[in-house]
Image (cartoon, helix red, strand yellow):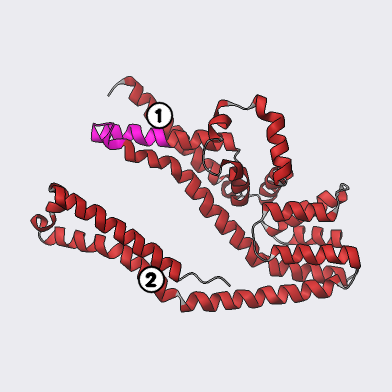
Amino acid sequence: MTPMLYVLIFLATVLGFEAFVSFNSGRRSGGQAKARRRLQRLAAGLQGPDAIEESILRKRSSRSLAETLLAFLPRSKTLELRLYRAGVAMNTRSFAILSAGLAVGGWVVGWVFFGDPAKALLLLLLGALPYWQVGRMARKRMGKFEAQFPDALELLTRAMRAGHSLTAGLQMVGNEIPDPVGTEFSHIAEEVKLGQDIRQALAGLAYRINTPDLPFFITAISIQRETGGNLAEVLEKLGHIIRERFKLYGKVRALTAIGRASANLLAVWPVVMVAGLYAVNPGYVAPLWEDEQGHLMVYASTALVVAGFLIARRMAIIKV
């Protein structure tokens, strides 16, 4: 190997270690207070689409090369929001450098092992692993927000019935409930204390958090601020409805478990069959990768299996 390959492998290793540390920094620190403060600082920079476009116009002349290249990627405008929803304390520039480093590093390692740079081009897909991981973490964190939201509404209702104001109740929820609900409600309370209108603070929350139950909460508070009414009673009923929806969602998942299992079996079974036949009689399945017609059969069967898996999974998804 040339010395440049050693350098590229070293850089890929360093970037991979940095990615692991960045994605797990909150867990390794062991302090929920640090994670909350970090997320609150990130939340202060996330505003509505109009504010984001205005900020981009102001900073367009001072963008770095990584940010300029990132602008050409699909969904690059929502990447910062996606990182926040995942709870990852990483800016878009570092994320772009990390993805590019993993892609180039994977290609270099594949070049070393395969001895042919063309055969290693498939390993460029390693650059998509951070984006996939961030998406998985964002879905997990938003699901945790939905699970904590009824408890937050119940605590907020009790605080208001005890005579506390809405802002004080939001702060109590932020102090008592862990991230992500606690972080978001605490941030709203701090914004209101600093003079921001409650409706603007809630609009920022709706932009940062993507859950189906949050708009009902924001609408209830907005209407109560304009027309008055018993907000505690409304929030209590809303929390009850959300809990009942979760119960129905659990029943639906139980009823569709067979469909999801069938989709997973459909995707895994061809690979298991080929591996079993190869273990019993390697010459029987050897034409799949030795003959040109075998290659076509592999490509066609892979496409059909993937299509069948996606259709079966789609049929098992029922929105509640």
- Say whether residue 302 is magenta: no
Who's the residue at 59% across and 57% down the image? 141
Dividing the picture into quarters, in which one does residue 209 lie? bottom right
Judged by depth in the image, the label closer to the viewer, 2 or 1, is 2
Q: Which residues, given as a range, are shown in magenta?
A: 103-120
Q: Which mark is residue 10?
A: 1
- Residue 37: image location, x then y, percent: 71, 46
- Say whether residue 108 is magenta: yes
Q: Is residue 216 left or right of residue 258?
A: right
Who's the residue at 88% across and 63% down the image? 225
Task: Name the residue carrying label 2.
Answer: 261
Q: Is residue 245 above or below residue 137?
A: below
Q: Is residue 123 left or right of residue 318?
A: left
Q: Is residue 141 left or right of residue 258?
A: right
Q: Amino acid at mark 1?
A: Phe
Report the front residue among 118 and 6. 118
Indicate the secondary structure of the residue bearing disc 2: helix
Q: Amino acid at mark 2?
A: Ala
Who's the residue at 71% across and 56% down the image? 206
Mark found first going from the N terminus, 2 or 1: 1
- Residue 254: image location, x then y, percent: 48, 77
Q: Which mark is residue 28?
A: none
Report the front residue among 252 and 9. 252
